C-alpha cells in the first residue's frame, strides 16, 4: 500500500494536488511547483497556473482564462503603433511573479519565434553605466545565436557610439540601440526581450526603458517594491507600461486556491470539495499574533509547501492505519482520520520551520 493508492482510493485524486507526479495527460511529470512554472520548457505547466493576480494596472495584458491562457496580450503589430511594452510584475518573492513572466514569454513565443531574452540584475550605480551594461549583455547573447552582424561588428559600433555620452532627459545611447535594430532587422526574427531584476529603482527603470525600447519590443521588470512599480508607470507618460501585482493570499483566497488545486486533481464528475483539507486547516495559517495590526497574508509558494507537507504526513500515517486494518476502504476510517485539521497543519509548519 502506497500514498498514491490512498490518494486514488480514499480521496479520488489522480495525484498529489501540491506535488503532482502525473500530468493531466496521465504521463509522469516532475513536480511543477519545485520551481517557477515555465511552459516554454514544459508545456504541461500551463495547467498549473492560478489567477491570483491584480490586473487593474494593465490595460494591455490579462487576465487568465479558464484554461490558464492570457486572454489579452498585444500582437507584434500593436507594438509598432503603441511602442515597446514595459511590463512590471510586482510582489514579494515566491508570489508567482516569475511564473507569470514565464507565461508571458511563452505567449510571445506562440505569436512567432521563441524570444531571445537578455537578463539584467540591477545592483545600483551610475545609470549611464547600467545602459552600457545592457548593451554589452546584448552583444554577448546575440552573438551566441546569430553570426550576422558579427560580435566584432557589434562591438565596433558600440565603441564608436559610446565614445561620447549621448543623453536625453531620461535616456542614454538611444542612437546605438536604434542602429543595432536596423542592423539585425533582416537577420533576427526572434523577439528581443530585456528582463530586469535586482535593486528596485523606478528612475533607473525609466532610463532603461527610454534608452533601449527601440531595440527591445518587450521589457520585463520583476520587483518586490509595489509602490515603485506604480510610480514608474505614472512617470513614463509617453510609454506603453503595464503593472501587474502578484499579491500574497488572504485566508479566503487561500481556501479558494486549495479548493481549486484539489479539484484539479480529482477524478471527473465528482462534486467540488477541499477534502481532505478542512477550512480549519487553512485558518490555522492565518491566526494573528497578539500584537498584530494587519491581517495575515501568505505567498502562494508558502501555501503549496505547507499543504504538501501536511498531506505527505497525513498519507504516511494513513498507510500504517489502513495496512493494520487490511483494506483500502474509506468506511474503515473515522472522520478524524480522513481529515487534515488545524493541528496537522500547525505540525507541518513547525517541521518546515525547523528544516525537517
Image (cartoon, helix red, strand yellow):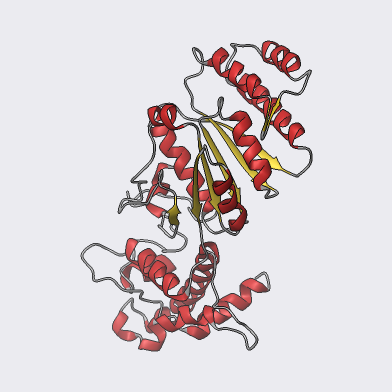
Viewer-side residue, 54 vs 94: 54
Q: Residue 229, relative to residue 332: is it above or below?
A: above
Q: Is residue 2 visible?
A: no
Q: Residue at 76% of width from left, 44% of height from top?
A: 124
Q: Quarter of the image containing the C terminus? A: bottom right
Give the mark count.
0
Viewer-side residue, 354 vs 329: 354
Residue 209 lies, in percent from the top left, at 60, 35
Q: Residue 83, relative to residue 310: is it above or below?
A: above
Q: Quarter of the image containing the N terminus? A: bottom left
Q: Residue at 35% of width from left, 47% of height from top?
A: 69
Residue 212 lies, in percent from the top left, at 61, 29
Q: Quadrant of residue 262?
A: bottom left
Residue 24 lies, in percent from the top left, at 33, 52
Viewer-side residue, 206 vs 285: 206
Residue 263 lies, in percent from the top left, at 32, 66
Q: Residue at 44% of width from left, 50% of height from top?
A: 29
Q: Is residue 165 visible?
A: yes
Q: Residue at 45% of width from left, 57% of height from top?
A: 53
Q: Residue 139, relative to residue 71: is it above or below?
A: above
Amino acid at each position: 500500500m502506497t500514498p498514491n493508492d490512498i490518494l486514488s482510493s480514499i480521496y479520488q485524486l489522480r495525484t498529489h494536488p501540491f506535488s503532482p507526479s502525473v500530468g493531466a495527460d496521465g504521463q509522469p511529470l516532475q513536480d511543477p511547483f519545485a520551481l517557477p512554472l515555465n511552459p516554454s520548457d514544459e508545456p504541461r505547466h500551463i495547467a498549473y497556473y492560478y489567477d491570483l493576480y491584480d490586473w487593474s494596472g494593465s490595460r494591455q495584458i490579462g487576465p487568465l482564462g479558464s484554461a490558464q491562457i492570457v486572454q489579452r496580450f498585444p500582437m507584434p503589430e500593436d507594438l509598432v503603433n503603441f511602442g515597446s511594452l514595459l511590463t512590471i510584475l510586482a510582489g514579494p518573492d515566491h508570489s508567482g511573479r516569475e511564473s507569470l513572466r514565464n507565461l508571458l514569454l511563452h505567449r510571445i513565443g506562440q505569436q512567432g519565434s521563441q524570444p531571445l531574452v537578455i537578463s539584467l540584475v540591477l545592483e545600483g550605480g551610475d545609470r549611464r553605466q547600467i545602459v552600457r551594461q545592457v548593451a554589452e549583455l546584448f552583444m554577448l547573447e546575440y552573438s551566441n545565436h546569430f553570426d550576422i552582424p558579427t560580435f566584432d561588428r557589434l562591438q565596433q559600433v558600440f565603441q564608436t557610439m559610446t565614445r561620447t555620452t549621448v543623453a536625453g532627459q531620461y535616456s542614454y545611447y538611444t542612437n546605438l540601440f536604434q542602429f543595432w535594430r536596423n542592423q539585425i532587422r533582416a537577420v533576427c526574427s526572434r523577439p528581443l526581450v530585456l528582463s530586469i531584476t535586482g535593486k528596485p529603482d523606478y528612475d533607473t527603470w525609466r532610463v532603461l526603458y527610454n534608452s533601449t525600447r527601440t531595440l527591445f519590443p518587450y521589457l520585463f521588470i520583476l520587483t518586490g517594491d509595489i509602490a515603485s512599480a506604480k510610480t514608474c508607470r505614472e512617470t513614463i507618460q509617453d510609454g506603453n507600461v503595464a503593472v501587474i501585482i502578484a499579491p500574497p493570499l488572504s485566508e479566503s483566497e487561500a481556501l479558494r486556491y486549495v479548493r481549486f488545486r484539489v479539484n484539479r486533481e480529482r477524478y471527473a464528475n465528482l462534486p467540488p470539495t477541499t477534502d481532505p483539507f478542512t477550512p480549519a486547516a487553512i485558518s490555522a495559517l492565518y491566526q494573528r499574533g497578539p500584537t498584530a495590526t494587519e491581517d495575515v497574508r501568505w505567498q502562494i509558494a508558502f501555501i503549496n509547501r505547507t499543504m504538501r507537507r501536511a498531506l505527505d504526513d497525513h498519507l504516511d500515517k494513513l498507510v500504517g492505519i489502513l495496512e493494520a486494518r487490511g483494506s483500502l476502504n474509506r468506511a474503515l476510517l473515522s472522520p478524524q482520520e480522513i481529515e487534515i485539521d488545524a493541528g496537522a497543519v500547525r505540525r507541518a509548519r513547525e517541521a518546515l520551520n525547523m528544516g525537517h
